[in-house]
Image (cartoon, rainbow, N blue to C red):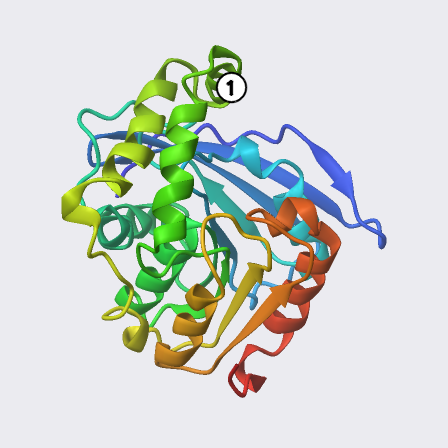
């Protein structure tokens, strides 16, 4: 797969052992445009450790992960990769809204292109919100290549709470001040990004979407993280992930936490990820 590369170090951070974290950025040719990707690589990362691929939420992008990818790379001592899905952040604009199969299409079409361009054979997936659902489907679709999955606030089906929260968010974004914050990350693509979330999730074709058929295909170990105050979904989501997963899985319910644990309880999430990825095959179920 040919791709245009702008691979330039633009930041250096130092861990407790003074190992540099080198960041690089690329634009990768994909069906429909170019996808922006960013990598964080510890200077002393063992080559045997597969990288962790971050999959963002419905309004997300690389920049909205803030400092979490660097801190995750530092804590794990392994490469971390994040990318803007087509139509988001610094990736190319997208014509038309995603289909009702957009979760599966990310795993089938776009993620393989990213992995090929970055020469990644094996990987671990860490997905937030709908990115968590994409991580599950990716693990099943690329089962020989995915060593572990961490879902964070992942939706597993369209729950009433999810529908109601998205409907309320759609109304909230009518406020120009709220919408301006979205434009800060997505520029003139912000209106499309909002529609790609609210219009697709609230549509009739998406009402029956579920991970029920995908979870048994996920054979690798999985950790399902969920906040006890998540406004976009109840404990039924991580419970379903653990009950139907084809491999060992456990859930971690974080107290006094909403939909974004990696921001609200960052140190706790980093610790859970590090412990899990140090020995993911030791899971006994949740």
Which residue of the protein is positioned furthest toward the left in this rendering?
Answer: 205
Crowdedness near tag 1: few (<14), some (14–19) or many (≥20) residues, C-alpha within 10 Å:
few
* Position of residue 230 measured from the top left corner of the image (x, y, whole percent): 54, 52
Tell me which residue sits at (43%, 32%) in the image.
Answer: 169
Q: How many marks?
A: 1
* Position of residue 153 measured from the top left corner of the image (x, y, whole percent): 50, 55
Which residue corresponds to mark 1?
Answer: 178
Tell me which residue sits at (50%, 14%) in the image.
Answer: 180
In the rendered view, does 261 fall on the left or right side of 186? right
The answer to whether one can see residue 48 in this image is yes
Above or below, 198 relative to 268? above
* Position of residue 59 measured from the top left corner of the image (x, y, whole percent): 43, 34
In the rendered view, does 38 fall on the left or right side of 70? left
The answer to whether one can see residue 92 in this image is no
* Position of residue 22 measured from the top left corner of the image (x, y, whole percent): 65, 40
Tell me which residue sits at (69%, 44%) in the image.
Answer: 21
Q: Secondary structure at mark 1?
A: helix
Tell me which residue sits at (31%, 59%) in the image.
Answer: 157
């Amino acid at each position: 797969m040919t791709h245009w590369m702008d691979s330039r170090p633009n930041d250096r951070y130092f861990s407790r052992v003074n190992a540099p974290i080198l960041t690089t950025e690329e634009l990768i040719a994909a069906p429909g445009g170019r996808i922006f990707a960013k990598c964080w690589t510890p200077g002393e990362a063992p080559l045997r450790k597969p990288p962790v691929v971050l999959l963002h939420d419905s309004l997300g992008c690389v920049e909205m992960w803030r400092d979490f990818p660097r801190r995750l790379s530092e804590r794990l001592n392994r490469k971390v990769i994040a990318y803007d899905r087509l139509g988001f952040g610094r990736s190319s604009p997208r014509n038309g809204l995603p289909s009702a199969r957009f979760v599966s299409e990310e795993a089938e079409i776009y993620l393989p292109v990213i992995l090929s361009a970055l020469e990644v054979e094996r990987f671990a997936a860490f997905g937030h919100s709908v990115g968590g659902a994409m991580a599950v489907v990716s693990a099943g679709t690329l089962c020989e290549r995915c060593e572990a999955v961490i879902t964070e606030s992942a939706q597993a089906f369209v729950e009433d709470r999810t529908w109601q929260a998205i409907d309320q968010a759609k109304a909230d974004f009518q406020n120009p001040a709220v919408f301006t914050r979205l434009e800060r990350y997505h520029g003139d693509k912000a209106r499309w990004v909002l529609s790609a979330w609210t219009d697709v999730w609230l549509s009739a074709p998406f009402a029956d979407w579920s991970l029920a058929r995908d979870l048994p295909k996920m054979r690798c170990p999985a950790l399902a993280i969920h906040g006890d105050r998540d406004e976009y979904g109840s404990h039924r989501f991580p419970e379903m992930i653990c009950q139907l997963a084809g491999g060992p899985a456990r859930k971690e319910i974080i107290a006094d936490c909403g939909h974004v644990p990696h921001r609200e309880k960052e140190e706790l999430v980093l610790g859970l990820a590090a412990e899990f990825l140090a020995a993911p095959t030791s899971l006994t179920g949740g």
